[in-house]
Image (tube, grey):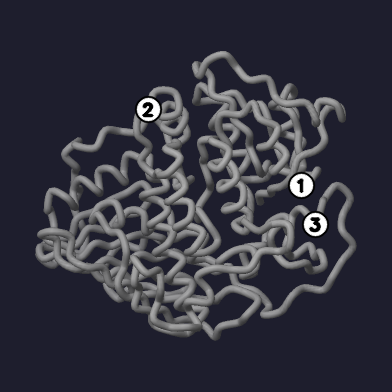
Amino acid sequence: MLSRRHFVLSAATAAATAPLVRAKALDRVRVGVVGLGNQGKYNWGELARKTDADVVAICDVDERMTGDARKQFPKATFYTDYRKMIEAKGLDAVLCATPDHHHFHVTHMALSHGLHAYCEKPLTHTVAEARTLIDLAKAKKLVTQMGTQIHAGDNYRRVVEAVRKGVIGPVKEVHVWVGGAWNGPGKRPDPKPVPAGLDWDLWLGPVAERPYAPEYVPFHWRRYWAFGGGRMADMACHHVDLPFWALDLKHPTKVSAEGSPVNPETGADWIVCKYEFPARGERPPVTLTWYDGDKRPPQLAKLPKWGDGTLFVGQKGMLLADYGRRKLFLDGDTKGSDVAGDGSIPNSVGHHKEWIEAIKNGSPTTCDFAYSGTLTEAVLLGVVSYRSGKPLTWDAAARKTGAAEADALLKKEYRKGWAV
């Protein structure tokens, strides 16, 4: 899992309170990493091995998560509160790998302090937060990247090229699915004593006070609406990214989700969500359907059983893709054939390196907040439709759904001391 939080603590108390030393030039980018658990470890490992970045500050509220990072970065200043890490100055950028309910606060504070930002998916916990970060990143002219690492993979690029060059003709229909569910028992777990080394108050951060339970920390927080968004918020930014990119999708006009009975505390057993996107220039309108849990599109009955994936349905045929494979199905073929791209999209130097290189020299990132924030917004609208039980008519300009119950879920209240 991942964590987040405030400043304090270092190899020595003095080191924790002293400002970080600022480098003379940006030949090396000084990064502070917030969240040192599973995904955080992957991220700081990528920075250390593959980029011109120096991890000079690390932060986590759970001492149990810090051992590997402390060994990897023995000279880094350690914090338990990310707010103080950012305020300490001496950073060029911040990488956020916390649970979802802290994504907005870490990233908003970093951008507000003039720091470049990388944030794990989903970019935010609410639709309103996503829009705020899009606007703030644009105003600050800072380099941003969301952690949809598969976007940097060669296979996604070849699929995007093939769809764009029309191998299956105009696409009016897409299906995206993943297995599994981040569901729960439908109630809050029984309180337990807070384990040594965990600052539970900082782990909660902007969320209203509630007792600690091991069902939340360190891993299963995604099952609870207070901290995550179930399977859809977890994985849709990875998988829906592919049709978003290939078809140049932005704001849906209608969103309608169904699923297992809605519970106010914990996530769904399954969700099927239908999005309607308008025409983009000469491209026709697109219907995109998301499936999780045990649900799948009917077309898969006659196609290879690959597990999670994406199916583009065009006038000439279908294109099936997952993270590492792609197959073309034309003229009723059910076995599929190989399909190549045209090389028009250069291979990535690496998702994290894209971000660091952009900070150094102004080169672009492929998942900046203008793109990934809009993707996150669409994904979270599906969660809102499911939780509210309402089909939505999305007015992207006014930021309203047409349903009061749904509008109430576009944002959330923050605990005292965490208002933004």
| Amino acid marked by disc 2 | Gly
Inter-mark Cα distance, 1 to 3 = 9 Å
**Secondary structure under the numbered disc 2 in the rendered image:** loop
| Residue 172, position as x, y percentages in the image | 18, 67
**Residue 22: image location, x then y, percent:** 63, 20
Q: Is residue 343 above or below residue 373?
A: above
**Residue 143 horizontal/vertical position (percent):** 44, 36
User: Which residue corresponds to the image point at 38% horizontal and 37% vertical from the top-left?
Assistant: 365
- The CA span between labels 1 and 2 is 33 Å
Q: Residue at x 69, y 60 (%)?
A: 206
C-alpha distance separating marks 2 and 3: 39 Å
Disc with the residue nearer the chain's start (2 vs 3)? 3
**Category of crowding for the residue at label 1, using alpha-carbon neighbours closer than 10 angstroms: few (below 14), some (14–19), many (at least 20):** many
The amino acid pointed to by label 1 is Val
Foreground label between 1 and 2? 2
Q: Which mark is residue 201?
A: 3
- As helix, strand or loop, the secondary structure at mark 1 comes to loop
Q: Which residue is mark 1?
A: 61
338 vs 59: above or below: below
Q: Is 125 positioned to the left or the right of 131 in the image?
A: right
> Which quarter of the picture shows residue 264?
bottom right
Image vertical order of residue 253 relative to residue 200, above or below: below
Name the N-terminal-most of marks 1 and 2.
1
> Which quarter of the picture shows residue 272?
bottom left
Q: Amino acid at mark 3?
A: Asp
Residue named by callout 2 = 362
Q: Choose the circle earlier in sequence order: 1 or 3.
A: 1
The answer to whether mark 2 and mark 3 are in CB contact below 8 A is no
**Which one is nearer the viewer's eye here, 53 or 13?**
13
Does dot 3 land on a helix, a strand or a loop? helix
